[in-house]
Amino acid sequence: MVPVDAARGSAWIADQLRQAIVEGSYKFGQKLPAERQLAEAFNASRTTVRLALDRLETDKLVARRIGSGTFVSYRQPGETDDIAEITSPVELIEARLAIEPYMTRLAVLNASAKDLEKLVEACEMAEAAGNDPTRFTEWDTQFHIRIAEASHNPLMLWIYRRVNEIRAHDQWASMRDKILTPQRIADYNRQHRALAEAIASRDVEGAVAMVTSHLHYARRQLMGAEGSV
């Protein structure tokens, strides 16, 4: 990296790091240099570097771990394609049933006030999506990712992001549009609200039971949709 005028700012530094990540100079799971090292390399302040890393984190290219550093979370295109092609919707739900109840238990125990606010925001945005399956799915996904974030377990979050990469694969689009009727969207929204309230109330067993019931409900809808293909 060539030292540059700090006035070029965080956007320029973010672009340089983004290019290095996308081109594979920094690979998935690799730790980036410390903020101090990046500040020296770019001839910038640590505040400017921190803002650049904020941009990359917002774009899901990196993940920061308190006390450990900043790690690349970007995967090269196609890395999850093979497993997505051979995983059925019901198999995906079964994997989620293995992960999400304990993930939810951790969220109840560890969620901060900010985490709880983000869960409520996801509920509100999903409800505001109305009967639009695409917009609802975006916020449905965010709701569950925010539970993973609230677990404050970086490995759990990493695993759950991989699950959602498969869930976002193109093959799921036709299944989503078939399943997400207005009534089912309303049902999911009610379930999300109840789950968010249980997490906020620190009701461990109640929250675990709710997310388990929520996923079994989704599994029944998927099985019905697959049977009608």
Image (tube, helix red, strand yellow):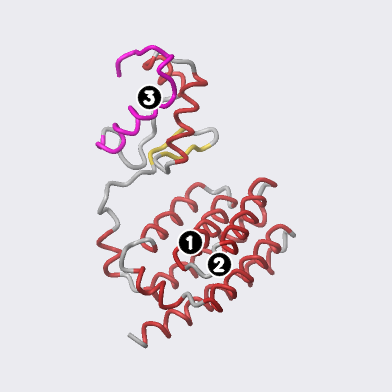
Mark 1 crowdedness (10 Å alpha carbons): few <14, some 14-19, many ≥20: some
Q: Position of residue 68 (x, y in %)?
A: 49, 34
Between the C-alphas of marks 2 and 1, the distance is: 8 Å
Between the C-alphas of marks 3 and 1, the distance is: 32 Å
Check contact, mark 2 vs mark 1: CB within 8 A: yes
Magenta stretch bounds: 1-24
Identify the amino acid type marked 2: Gly
Give the residue number, with chain letter if any, for mark 3: 12
| Quadrant containing the N terminus in the rendered view | top left
- In front of the other: label 3 or label 1? 1
Identify the amino acid type marked 3: Trp
| Quadrant containing the C terminus in the rendered view | bottom left
- In the rendered view, tell whether residue 98 sits above or below residue 108: below
Whether 20 is among the magenta residues is yes
Q: Position of residue 221 (x, y in %)?
A: 47, 81
Q: Position of residue 125 (x, y in %)?
A: 58, 58
Give the residue number, with chain letter if any, for mark 2: 130
Label located before the other in sequence (3 or 2): 3
Label located before the other in sequence (2 or 1): 2
| Front in this rendered view, residue 25 or 172 | 172
Label located before the other in sequence (3 or 1): 3
Query: Under tag 3, what secondary structure?
Result: helix
Left or right, residue 211 beside residue 57? right
Identify the amino acid type marked 1: Arg
Label disc, if present, on residue 135 of the rendered structure = 1
Query: Under tag 1, what secondary structure?
Result: helix
Residue plotted at (39% across, 56% down): 162
Determine which quarter of the picture holds residue 56: top left
Q: Point out the residue furthest to the right here.
A: 201
